[in-house]
Image (tube, rainbow, N blue to C red):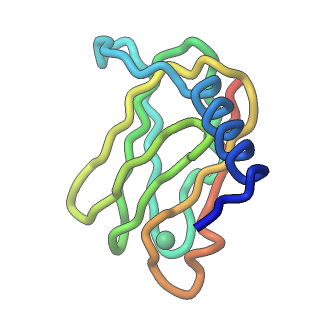
C-alpha cells in the first residue's frame, strides 16, 4: 500500500510537537507535589478544567464513580486507565505553558465522545 507523502510529513510533525510538549516525568518526593484529584463518571471528568503551574510538581489522582474509563492527553503524552476500586496516579512536572485537551479513551456509552476536558498550564 502506498502512503501519501503528505501524510508521512504530518505524522512526523505531530510526533515532533508531542515530544516538545511532553511534560517531564521524574521522581520527586510525594510530599512536595500538589495533588489534584479527578473523578470520572459517565460522561464527564470532574473537574473538567485542570489548572497547573509550570515547573510545579503535581500528582494527578484519578478514581471512577461508576465503570472503567481512561484519561488520555495526546499532546502532553499522558495516559492512564481509571478502573473501579483503584486510584490511578500520574506524576509530572509541566514544562510548557498552554491549553491542552484530554479525553476518555475507553468506550463507556452513548456520551463517550463528549467525555473530555482541558489542562491549562500557566
Ligand atoms: Cu468514555
Q: Is residue 102 left or right of residue 66?
A: right
- How many labels were placed on the picture? 0
Give the residue furthest to the right: 6
Residue 99: image quadrant is top right
Q: Is residue 28 left or right of residue 56?
A: left
Give the residue furthest to the left: 85
- Residue 66, position as x, y percentages in the image: 35, 73
The residue depicted at 43 percent of the width and 46 percent of the height is 79
The residue depicted at 73 percent of the width and 46 percent of the height is 10
- Residue 2, position as x, y percentages in the image: 64, 63
- Residue 1, position as x, y percentages in the image: 58, 68
Residue nearest the viewer, comparing 43 with 109:
109
Picture layout, residue 115 above or below residue 5:
below
The residue depicted at 70 percent of the width and 35 percent of the height is 120
Give the residue furthest to the bottom: 110
For the C terminus, give its image quadrant: top right
Amino acid at each position: 500500500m502506498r502512503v501519501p507523502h503528505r501524510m508521512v510529513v504530518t505524522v512526523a510533525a505531530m510526533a515532533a510537537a508531542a515530544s516538545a510538549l511532553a511534560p517531564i516525568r521524574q521522581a520527586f518526593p510525594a510530599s512536595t507535589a500538589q495533588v489534584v484529584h479527578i473523578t470520572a463518571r459517565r460522561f464527564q471528568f470532574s473537574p473538567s478544567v485542570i489548572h497547573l503551574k509550570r515547573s510545579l510538581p503535581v500528582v494527578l489522582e484519578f478514581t471512577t464513580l461508576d465503570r472503567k474509563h481512561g484519561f488520555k492527553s495526546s499532546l502532553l503524552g499522558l495516559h492512564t486507565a481509571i478502573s473501579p476500586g483503584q486510584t490511578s496516579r500520574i506524576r509530572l512536572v509541566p514544562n510548557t505553558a498552554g491549553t491542552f485537551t484530554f479525553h476518555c479513551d475507553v468506550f463507556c456509552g452513548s456520551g463517550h465522545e463528549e467525555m473530555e476536558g482541558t489542562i491549562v498550564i500557566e
